[in-house]
Amino acid sequence: MITMIKTMSLSPGMPQQQPPPPPSLPSQQLLSTPSQPSTTLPLRTIPGSYGWPMLGPISDRLDYFWFQGPETFFKKRIEKHKSTVFRTNVPPSFPLFLNVNPNVVAVLDCKSFAHVFDMDLVEKKNILVGDFMPSVDFTGGVRTCAYLDTTEPQHAKLKNFAMDTLKRSSKVWVTELLANLDTMCTTFETNIAKKGTVSYLIPLQRCIFNFLVKSLVGADPATQPEIQESGYAMLDRWLALQLLPTVHIGVLQPLEELFLHSFAYPFVLVGGDYKKLYDFIETQGQEVLQRGETEFGLSKEDVIHNLLFVLGFNAFGGFSVFLPSLIAVIASDKKGLQEKLRNEVREKIGSTSLTFDSVTRLDLVQSVVYETLRVNPPVPLVYGRARKDFRLGSYESEFDIKKGEVLCGYLKLIMKDRKVFSEPEVFKPDRFVGEGSRLLSYLYWSNGPQTGSPSEHNKQCAAKDYVVLTASMIVAYLFKRYDSFVGDSSSITAVEKAK
Ligand code: HEM
């Protein structure tokens, strides 16, 4: 099986593996363990403020969603405060989010953000998308794994269940992924021949949905035509209603502000869809349900709601955002990247079949996947709440953090940290090849370093390695099938089949 997938257990409360010093940092600036502050850095009051009650949060919200957009919002404040650590508000906020506290301490460099991985310092209860939490009605009244802190006993059970489900699914995962890629490519080849340009977003989502349901649930969507036909769209609607108050769309202002960011939409609008998906898993996922109940001591309801969350939110949601950005990087290339990828795939894989082991030999393919995750992290914001008072260090200063304060990391800027990544704004396909693999300690897309190991004692993505291997396999598949292809993040305009 996959040699990369390790489940090294850390003892409870033990800080996560610390990253080595960034390659471009002089030795006197080595990263100290977050919980052991360096003695040489000056103590500074955290710059920035939350502004007047109500007015501060509204003004920040309008900047974030409308006038600046998230990336400029954070960049401008780094410049203003001359610090990668500062106080600000993040949406959602007033008027109709009265119980949500928008105040956060932004941590926007690799060193200060790494404190969020230290479960001694940071609590992760109900903080997946910030202080705002979508109603538990969306998950059958159950707080699913991603909303649980590591100190809650249910977290260990559910995380172990998720990792076990992934491990067991790995054989089916590959065959199902490849079979569904065949179907998807055949569909859009036919459509390109007819229409010239095709949008691949729906075929791609169908492909992701089918292979994930077969792999994670062990069920065939084809047994229920409505699930096969519309299961992916049901998940899209369910995801959208939960996340709308926090997501920047940037095309409909000011309507977006009034109708999408001002209140939370009720579950009832997608209740029918959710019930259909729940019933499908209950009737078709007997084996995985039984394992959850007998081996992990979970109730049937906990298993189904958590499976649906892992399937729909973590896996389907994550891949639906990530894969179009990966395809866009490759399909829009004009600098010879396709040729290099094609050569690597054909030299190292040739006509042999694709396996998780064989794609780990594709250094450039994997580096392109890592670089896409660095430049376009699919989950851009990660939060944590201080478990106790502690001192947090950036490269230049230290700051006192008080128990209960929320730390907010915007990964798109964190992984462009100049002290770690040279020419951070540039997409360098081979950044992580050879010596560059040292940088994997600073690739944080999974809520932990790429060199770390997800476990019940931390909150790192259970599928950290599966995501990279799956994406690498898709790239390898495309270059076995095509000599080249042209397109962007939503459509393909031309494909040249392998000769
Ligand atoms: C491109 C795809 C994916 C991305 C970008 C992604 C990203 C993430 C991130 C950032 C977190 C941490 C969130 C936080 O605590 O702030 C997370 C957690 C998690 N992910 Fe993924 N994920 C992906 C795919 C998957 C898949 C395929 C699975 C399937 C099992 C999965 C299972 C989980 C679970 C169970 C957690 C919760 C971990 C915990 O509570 O300790 N993810 N994911």
Image (spheres, rainbow, N blue to C red):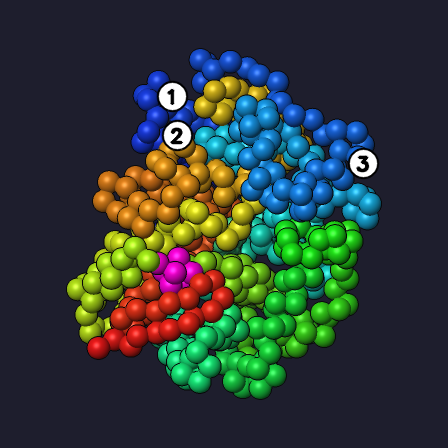
Give the x, y percent position of residue 229: 57, 82
The residue nearer to you, when weighing 332 against 449, is: 332
Q: Secondary structure at mark 2?
A: loop
Bounds of the magenta segment: 327-333
Residue 15 shows in this picture: no
Q: Amino acid at mark 1?
A: Gln
For discs 1 and 2, the disc positioned in front in the rendered view: 2
The residue nearer to you, when weighing 329 against 391, is: 329
Q: Cβ–Cβ below 8 Å for labels 1 and 2?
A: yes
Q: Earlier in the sequence, mark 1 or mark 2?
A: 1
Q: Confirm whether the magenta stretch covers residue 210.
A: no
Q: Looking at the image, which residue is at 19% across and 70% down? A: 350
Mark 3 surroundings within 10 Å by alpha-carbon count, few (fewer than 14), some (14 through 19), many (20 or more): few
Judged by its main secondary structure, the magenta piece is helix
Residue 179: image quadrant is bottom left
For discs 3 and 1, the disc positioned in front in the rendered view: 3
Q: Looking at the image, which residue is at 51% across and 19% down? A: 397
* Residue beneath disc 2: 419
Q: Earlier in the sequence, mark 3 or mark 2?
A: 3
Give the x, y percent position of residue 255: 75, 56
Residue at mark 1: C-beta within 8 A of ligand 1: no
Q: Confirm whether the magenta stretch covers residue 332.
A: yes
* Residue beneath disc 1: 29
Q: Looking at the image, which residue is at 29% across and 77% down? A: 497
* Residue beneath disc 3: 54
